Image: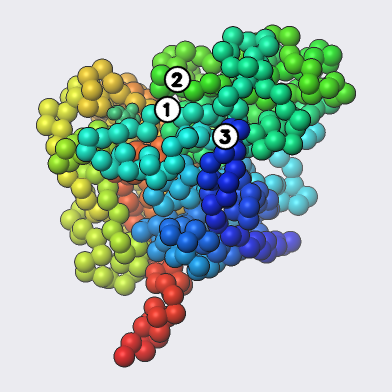
Amino acid sequence: SFGSQERHFKWDVEYIFRAPDCLEHPVMGINGQFPGPTIRARPGDNIVVELTNKLHTEGVVIHWHGITQFGSPWADGTASISQCAVDPGETFFYRFKVDKPGTYFYHGHYGMQRSAGLYGSLIVDVAEGEKEPFHYDDEFNLLLSDWWHKSAHEQEIGLSSNPFRWIGEPQSLLINGRGQYNCSLAANNGNSSSPQCKFRGTEQCAPQVLKVLPNKIYRLRIASSTALASLNLAIGNHKMIVVEADGNYVQPFAVDDLDIYSGESYSVLITTNQNKEENYWLSIGVRGREPKTPQALTLLNYLPNSASKLPNSPPPVTPRWNDYAHSKNFTKSILALMGSPKPPANFHRRVVLLNTQNKINGFTKWAINNISLVLPPTPYLGSIKYGLRNGYDKRRPPEGFPNEYDVMKPPINPNSTTGNGIYVFSHGSIVDVILQNANALTENVSEIHPWHLHGHDFWVLGYGEGKFSEKDVGKFNLKNPPLRNTAVIFPYGWTALRFVADNPGVWAFHCHIEPHLHMGMGVIFAEGVNRLPKVPNEAFACGLTAKRFMNGNNN
Ligand SMILES: O=C1O[C@H]([C@@H](O)CO)C(O)=C1O
């Protein structure tokens, strides 16, 4: 399109020593930075990321979360799905177009590399000469994450062990890769048992202070790449107007605090119209799991006040972790901005996906319709495109679950099986997905799962309690459902989504809680793969020997 640019980046992924929460640990960085560099682009721009793997003993891929990859499914950055993991020493070229303004991010999508710190921001501004449907004077970008003192490797080994070792709650929450583990910014006016932090400001774990001028409007871009934690964000004395969710404009609404699940992004507007002699807290706490992690904090610093002037009152408190009514109220308030694309009135195919915690040979797993996803070694995109017979399980996974299954109780028979079959959708068909939550292995436990779809936005048609039934269809919102790429299922509830299968490729659809995906909580969708032109060789084979074989020189 007119004025579009190529934006070229050269990135080295490597472990670096960093102190994200003031304690030093190996962190997966990019070009020596953590979080990785921010990509900023405009709609229509071609992004080229020349990614060199400097990890020495691990493969790597990067997923561009929220970017549809229309016409470039091999650049989606999902190991075993859209490409082979990039070998140590190798360089892979991600080439893709960004199509829609919004707040996005990128992250590792191989094993548990997101937990290791492989993530960064991707911001698409409006096209030159165009305006957002709201006004603001300046903006801040807040990429939220959670951090463990146990390495991603140790976490992963625990999950794959029998007896199972759960990763537990994070030690710290990070804002733009910065948190404070053994001190608190609010010790002097809160009830923290930690000592007051004393920062010069140059420390790796010093908070990024948000410096604002009085009586202005600021846009906060907020994205969550947490591995586990669902979060709630609040700013002392300031209401937030929600205007964007996952790169889509929403009908503006005001809140005192905002829930954000892993894989989601929001933009909110705040007006700096409070007492300008004061500074204010921005605080982030854990939702949906019994919190064992202190709040993350930073300051809204009204200039010219000193940033060392602490607010008079303690940081806003996070709503009670299991106040699901509060969460549902927020989530259901998110509706598409008037004039947004509407969903088709009917669907061609409905897939119901039951989410259960299971056992396989004594190992703890998650399963969808009783199949726990284990990715095949050959990427699906290549297996399908080239008709490879043994690339993956050709049996179609179930479209639903037995009617008598009681979602309110632990599974009667918790034993499950692994699989890697795919859901194949006809090109252009309209697909409804009902995500059905259930009781986990333990009685009276049902968890939150934020589900993320690659390659598409979907409309969120509705949320409900208990088991989904046909009569719930009548309550679907077809008028102004929000378009998103991530939607949460609440404990013991269901969430209904609709999307158009019009993006040729193979797409992961999964719980964005990284350990849950690792334990099998995902499915694979494929559509229109036969329409794809030649797939770049380097997506499916590595090194010069592979190139030689592909050129037919294999003797
Ligand atoms: O997958 C999970 O495992 C643990 C627990 O269910 C078993 O230890 C937990 O809280 C999860 O979310």
Residue mark closest to the camera, 3 vs 1: 3
Residue 88 in picture, x, y percent from top left: 47, 64
First along the sequence among labels 3 and 2: 3
Looking at the image, which residue is at 21% across and 58% down?
Answer: 393
Quick check: is the Cβ at mark 3 less than 8 Å away from ligand 1? no
First along the sequence among labels 3 and 1: 3
**Foreground: 141 or 169?**
169
Residue 221 marker: none
User: Considering the numbered disc 3 on the image, is that residue within a helix, a strand or a loop?
Assistant: loop
- At label 2, the amino acid type is Pro
Q: CA distance from mark 3 to mark 2?
A: 21 Å
- At label 1, the amino acid type is Glu
Number of residues whose C-alpha sits closer than 10 Å to that of mark 1, classed few (under 14), some (14–19) or many (20 or more): some
- The picture quadrant for ligand 1 comes to top left
Q: Label 1 belongs to which residue? A: 169
Residue 361 in picture, x, y percent from top left: 14, 41
**Foreground: 550 or 368?**
550
Residue 23 marker: 3
- At label 3, the amino acid type is Leu
Q: CA distance from mark 3 to mark 1?
A: 17 Å
- Relative placement, left or right, of 535 versus 141 is left
User: Considering the numbered disc 1 on the image, is that residue within a helix, a strand or a loop?
Assistant: loop
Residue 64 in picture, x, y percent from top left: 53, 51
CB under 8 Å between discs 1 and 2: yes
Q: Label 2 belongs to which residue? A: 291
CB under 8 Å between discs 3 and 1: no
